[in-house]
Image (cartoon, grey):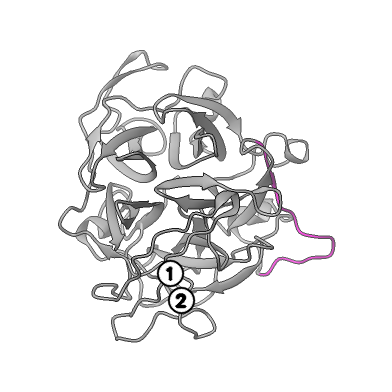
Amino acid sequence: MKRSWLMYISAFALAGGACNNAGPASQGSDSTSTAHTAAPDSSGSRIVDETGAPANWALLPFTKVDSANPILTPGTGRFTDPILHKEVAWEEKDVFNPAVAVKGDTLYLLYRAQDKTGQPAGTSRIGLAMSFDGLHFTRSPAPVLNPDADAWKKLEWEGGCEDPRVVEDERQTYYMTYTAFDGRQARLLIATSQDLRHWTKHGPVFATAYHGKYKDLWSKSGSIVSRYENGRIIATRVAGKYWMYWGDQNIWAATSDDLINWTPVEMAPGEQPPIPLRGQAVNMPLLKIVVPTRAKKFDSDLVESGPPAMLTDKGILLIYNGRNIPSIGDSSLPEGTYAGGQVLMDRNDPTKVIHRLENYFIRPDKPYEITGQVGQVCFLEALTNFQGKWFLYYGTADSKIAVAEKK
């Protein structure tokens, strides 16, 4: 279950572009976040959306922090695995695809780590690292979420717990969406915590929807719509419901009343998908595709949700990952390249696209992004506003973790 999951920050070279220093606005329970500027590309022109207009709705520009990257590499942590009943070097092979949360003056990075056993290329667990500057981290010695001898063992062992995304509610309960992989099937699960260290698993997010119709179908990458407020990422209702973007063939949507039990959005009677169904989408033909792949572009083969979607005054901003196949996509990018895009959804109808970047804003161009467990990957998964700047954390070549910043 490997994907070029890590992206690069702009073949539209974001170095040197003017940027907006405004942070997210805080306006109560339905407050919005504003910090959007268009960034120049390497030719000096503006990054544009699909209409050719300047993308003044997007969160740009980001610059890779070369002085610190990669900020996290495989580690020496060991713990006693509750299933194997022996000590395991749980992060010795690869670390990648993190989530982020901020409490007070501390930034918490929850990251995927692999050992050298398990399926298909090591069992994955979720580790925790802390930072006071967003660039230098101290790790916890043991994972904070991992396969265990519990009700979810058959779903998580021995592929593991992958690719977390974390939000919180108004009362500071944290919700982690993560992928459980049993070596064959990926399922989107959810866990909760009060302190980011001790997590309670609640199982598959789609367990109760439509009498469990989607519980055992392929699902992953849950990006819950939130407002970004003083470092916090707070899940926020839209039209009376919580919303989540999910999926890694196309991007679909789901709604919830409690942030734990989710219902995928299906098409209305008579509605047809916007593109021919491929891959995992064939097994879920009734689902409404809200962000499809695009021919001749960097996201031709696959699109996958990135960090928690941001509720803004212009709409719902979703940073996403796209995978390329040159024969059907961008012929200038190598086979399998994962690069980052941005799309703006309608806050009155979260299934409707308002704007979408014409091209990627970040792609692999560093040695550690080009070569690794899976080459040519920048996989964007964590975004936060911390100490007056935006930090975008991403996995590189399924092997390390890097960061880009927007001041």
Q: Is residue 351 in view?
A: yes
Q: Position of residue 103 (x, y in %)?
A: 37, 38
The reply to whether discs 1 and 2 touch (Cβ–Cβ < 8 Å) is: yes
- Mark carried by residue 255: none
Query: Tag 2, which secondary structure?
Result: loop
Which residue, given by chain and number where applicable, does mark 2 sit on? 56
Q: 1 or 291: nearer the eye?
A: 291
Which quadrant does the C terminus fall into?
Answer: bottom left
Q: CA distance from mark 1 to mark 2?
A: 6 Å
User: Earlier along the polypeptide chain: callout 1 or callout 2?
Assistant: 1
Would residue 4 be visible to someone looking at this image? no
What residue is drawn where x is 74% and y is 54%? 266
Callout 2: 10 Å neighbours few (<14), some, many (20+)?
some
Instruction: Pick out the residue farthest to the left.
Output: 67
Prevalent SS, magenta region: loop
* Range of magenta residues: 261-274
Residue 377 part of the magenta-drawn span = no
Q: Does residue 237 sit above or below 176 in this rendering?
A: below
**Which element is circle 1 on?**
loop
Give the image location of residue 125, x and y in percent: 38, 32
User: Along the line of sight, which residue is nearer the eye, 294 or 349?
Assistant: 349
Q: Position of residue 313 (x, y in %)?
A: 55, 65
Q: Is residue 202 above or below residue 104?
A: above
Q: Is residue 290 left or right of residue 299?
A: right
Q: Quadrant of residue 404?
A: bottom left
The N terminus sits in image quarter: top left
Q: Which residue in the protein does label 1 denote? A: 36
Q: Amino acid at mark 2?
A: Asn
Residue 30 lies, in percent from the top left, at 60, 53
User: Which residue extends farthest top?
Assistant: 85
- Residue sitting at x 44%, y 32%: 160
